[in-house]
Image (tube, rainbow, N blue to C red):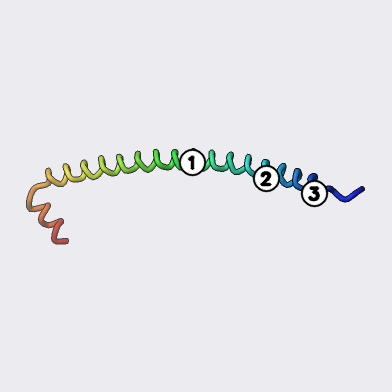
Amino acid sequence: MSKPTPIDQIAERVDRLLVRYGELQRTNALLTQQVHQLTTERDALKSRLHTARARVDALMERLPEHIASQKDTS
């Protein structure tokens, strides 16, 4: 076999770069999708936390005053 010409070497490197570019594009798309899913999950959890806090606050307001003051001191 003869030694590859500089053009052949460049063409091989370009091919490898194109393959790597495609891999990076797929990885980026997957990561973008994952960020979107995690953002959606975070927003849902924040909403649930807000709802739970509001419910706890409402329950605490319904407690008789002497029980509420005992809870505050402990």
Residue at the bottom extreme, as displayed:
74
Q: Which residue is mark 3?
A: 6
> At 16% across and 42% down in the image, what residue appears?
58
| Image coords of residue 46 (percent x, y) | 31, 43
Judged by depth in the image, the label closer to the viewer, 2 or 3, is 3
Left or right: 55 as drawn, with respect to 65:
right
Mark 2 or mark 3: which comes first in sequence?
A: 3
Which of the labelled discs sits on residue 34, or is there none? Answer: 1
Q: Which residue is mark 2?
A: 17
Left or right: 43 as drawn, with respect to 17:
left
The three-letter code of the residue at mark 1 reads: Gln
In front of the other: 14 or 66:
14
The three-letter code of the residue at mark 3 reads: Pro
> At 12% across and 46% down in the image, what residue appears?
63
Q: Secondary structure at mark 2?
A: helix
Q: Secondary structure at mark 1?
A: helix
Which of the labelled discs sits on residue 50, or is there none? Answer: none
Q: Are marks 1 and 2 in contact (CB under 8 Å)?
A: no
